[in-house]
Amino acid sequence: MSEVYLPEGWMSDSLGNLVDIAVGKTPSRSDSRYWDGGVHKWATIASMEFGRELNDTKEKITDLAIKEANPKLVRKGTLMFSFKLTIGKMAFAGCDLYTNEAIATLVPKDKRIDKKFLFYALQVADLTINVGDAAKGATLNTKTMPLIEVIFPEDVKEQRRIVARIEELTRRAEEARRTAVERDAELNILLQALYGQMIEDVKWKPLHEVASLVRRSIKTKPDEKYEEMGIRSFGRGTFKKPVLTGDQIGNKRIYRIHEGDLVFNNVFAWEKAIAVAKKEDHGRVGSHRFITYVPHKEKTTSEFLCHHFLSERGIEDIRAASPGSAGRNRTLGLTKLEKILVPVPEHDEQKRFAEIAKRRQLVQQESSGIEADVKAFTAALLAKAFRSEL
């Protein structure tokens, strides 16, 4: 074990001595009987939201999968811990469920450590200290995970006092975050309802008839700085990437982005990497992988088109126009994209839709800001807590 600072009344021990560790399992993907019509919740790392209860999963498995693949049941309230690819993502099971093999469950062996305290303790532990240099930061395994060193007060009552204090101090910020999330969900429901009404009995036209492909080429200079824009998958909007110099960009082609552009990442559009450029994105640059469309005046809006392409029908069309199977990379074809049919409701209706979409975007930004503040505040609290100063 490495040497760690231990406040008076605290001790350290390996994770394997404190909890029973079990790992999930993926039933064979090639056997549809394990998946089709499944009712038992089955979680992946993507299912988990850090520190939250996991109450539902996108994928579900069948009774036959449980009988033949024999995955381990995760009981409600169990602490789940990711140890492959993404190390240390944690959530609590909000119901009985199953997981894949990238998630371990941590069940205290005795009354030495409280599971909620363990959740915080693992956030300050060195999770990869026993991993070889070649793999450090990439993955743990069932041999190295039990060696993780955990520090904790010997008195479980003190552990629970610390947990209660952290929860008390973060409660107000957490309530603000939850309120923002609820507002986002309400606006999303409103947008979905409006969209459904707007596309009833309307004309559908090829994309190129209502919007134009625009490329604002930039001739880079070695010493100039260029702020890059990125697009998240799964319809999660844009983000700021690191600033690059012209020298770092080299011969790569880049293009200027303007507020209100409808932007597709051509290799991940099939994964919903589609977004509308925000006010703060104006003037940023995008790589040659970005396809930028500008709506024709009085015909459509970027917000409505983006919502459509992220809808079930829209993303099906995007995927059909994105051949290839090189990992997650499936390139969206320009010619196929411009021919995709899109609904064209009355422009005034689209403008109203766009205003609500912009309002939702502001709520999402507020939620992200609150979440970042909560994380920073919690990190500071943990630093104090594990010096026994809380």
Image (cartoon, helix red, strand yellow):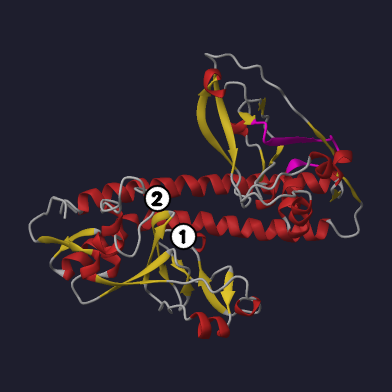
Local secondary structure at mark 2: loop
Instruction: Using the numbered discs, state the Cα–Cα distance from disc 1 to disc 2 in whole angstroms.
Output: 20 Å
- Which quadrant does the C terminus fall into? bottom left
- Identified by mark 1, the residue type is Glu
Mark 1 or mark 2: which comes first in sequence? 1
Residues drawn in magenta: 287-302
The answer to which quarter of the image holds residue 256 is top right
Q: In this view, does 203 lie to the left or right of 53?
A: right
Q: Is residue 26 left or right of residue 143?
A: right
Pointer 2 local density, CA inside 10 Å: few below 14, some 14–19, many at least 20: some
Q: How far across and down, in percent of the image, does residue 359 sit?
A: 63, 46
Is 299 one of the magenta-colored residues? yes
The answer to whether any part of residue 261 appears in the image is no
* Residue for badge 1: 49
The answer to whether any part of residue 149 appears in the image is yes
Q: How far across and down, in percent of the image, does residue 321 sit?
A: 78, 49
Is 297 one of the magenta-colored residues? yes
Local secondary structure at mark 1: loop
- Decide: is 136 above or below 149: above
Q: Nearer the viewer, residue 63 or 132?
A: 132
Say which residue appears at 72% left-offset and 44% top-offset. 303
- Identified by mark 2, the residue type is Ala
* Residue for badge 2: 138
Residue 114 numbered tag: none
- Camera-nearest label, 1 or 2: 2
Q: In this view, does 137 lie to the left or right of 285?
A: left
